């Protein structure tokens, strides 16, 4: 099995202010130190410039966006292009979050096109897939996840290694009703099998799969213990430095996480 570094990304959604962001980043920087996993924060796009400055000169926390346009540029009022995001040092972009699929009517094809745009710009897309409560109750979980994933793979399969897939059951987002870790792990394995079927075992082994939906410091370790769950996309808890820091620490000590620098011992031969 390949060494997949865990990723913990915070989705701030439409929250924050200049003052609140500054306080949160300052507390986070002190709290997380140099984590043994990848960490990103995804503020509203108007604050990307501020966050770029706040995060300058450190490597512990990367900058992410919550969305990007499927277009290169032009007459698309209100949209932000991948090239613009690159100007602000953005490394990750959440794509196809269920709130955008639901409120902005984003289709599977649009999501796939956005993923392609992100990859072309050198931004790692965090593609969200997941079923609604009704779809789960109707036994459609696998069908929905595979359908959403297929659109992305169809256009971007060649770069699946550089893509992060977030399994985010819609009914678990912001509800406090987290998905059972064993069930989240089962869906992750479905996703990995689907990637393997399309692009082979090495691609399936390399793609990072993260879970999102009411992750907290109390339940994070249970997700990270699953060998197929490579991190978390965190909403509400990412707005509190102590909670987000605790989730990052849980990822850093999870099985498979690299030992912190200085803690590695040479194995006797
Ligand atoms: C999210 O917004 O992607 C999310 C997972 O939110 P929460 O952690 O609040 O459920």
Image: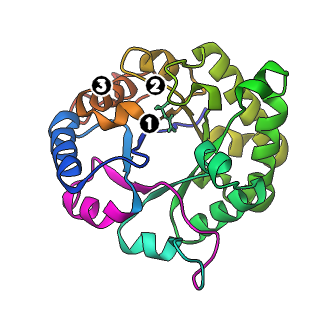
Query: Looking at the rendering, in which quadrant would you find the C terminus?
Result: top left
Above or below, comparing residue 243 to residue 110 in the picture: above
Where residue 37 sits, quadrant-wise, is top left
Above or below, comparing residue 76 to residue 89 in the picture: below
Nearest to the observer: residue 157 or residue 141: 141
Image coords of residue 47 (percent x, y): 31, 61
The residue carrying mark 2 is: 215
Residue at 84% across, 27% down? 140
The secondary structure type at the circle numbered 1 is loop
Q: Real-space Cα distance between discs 1 and 2? A: 8 Å
Please tell me whether residue 58 belongs to the stretch shown in magenta.
yes
Indicate how the structure is coloured in the image: rainbow
Image coords of residue 131 (percent x, y): 72, 32
Above or below, comparing residue 51 to residue 150 in the picture: below
Most extreme residue toward the bottom is 74
Of label 1 and label 3, which has the lower sequence position?
1
The secondary structure type at the circle numbered 2 is loop
Q: Which residues are magenta?
A: 46-74
The reply to whether the residue tagged 1 has its Cβ within 8 angstroms of ligand 1 is: yes
**Residue 207 seen in the figure:** no
Residue at 81% across, 48% down? 150
Q: Is residue 244 found left or right of 21 in the rendered image?
A: right
Where residue 242 sits, quadrant-wise, is top left
Image coords of residue 116 (percent x, y): 66, 65
Where residue 226 sits, quadrant-wise, is top right
The residue carrying mark 3 is: 246
The reply to whether the residue tagged 2 has its Cβ within 8 angstroms of ligand 1 is: yes
Of the two numbered discs 1 and 3 in the rendering, the one whose residue sits closer to the viewer: 1
Tag on residue 235?
Answer: 1
Of the two numbered discs 2 and 3 in the rendering, the one whose residue sits closer to the viewer: 2
């Amino acid at each position: 099995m390949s060494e997949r570094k865990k990723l913990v990304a915070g989705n701030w959604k439409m929250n924050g202010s200049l003052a609140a962001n500054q306080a949160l980043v300052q507390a986070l920087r002190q709290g997380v130190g140099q984590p043994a996993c990848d960490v990103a924060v995804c503020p509203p796009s108007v604050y990307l410039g501020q966050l770029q400055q706040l995060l300058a000169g450190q490597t512990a926390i990367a900058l992410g966006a919550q969305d990007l346009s499927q277009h290169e540029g032009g007459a698309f009022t209100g949209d932000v292009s991948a090239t613009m995001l690159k100007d602000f040092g953005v490394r990750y972009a959440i794509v196809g979050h269920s709130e955008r699929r639901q409120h902005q009517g984003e289709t599977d094809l649009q999501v796939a096109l956005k993923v392609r745009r992100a990859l072309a710009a050198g931004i790692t897309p965090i593609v969200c897939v997941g079923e609604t409560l009704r779809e789960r109750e109707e036994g459609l979980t696998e069908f929905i996840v595979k359908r959403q994933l297929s659109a992305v793979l169809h256009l971007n399969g060649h770069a699946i290694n550089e893509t992060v897939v977030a399994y985010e059951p819609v009914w678990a987002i912001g509800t406090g009703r987290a998905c059972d870790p064993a069930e989240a792990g089962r869906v992750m394995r479905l996703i990995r099998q689907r990637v393997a079927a399309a692009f082979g075992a090495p691609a399936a082994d390399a793609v990072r799969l993260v879970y999102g939906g009411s992750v907290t410091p109390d339940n994070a370790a249970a997700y990270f213990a699953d060998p197929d769950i490579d991190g978390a996309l965190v909403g509400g808890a990412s707005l509190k430095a102590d909670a987000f820091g605790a989730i990052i620490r849980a990822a850093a000590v999870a099985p498979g996480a690299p030992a912190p620098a200085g803690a590695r011992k040479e194995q006797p031969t």
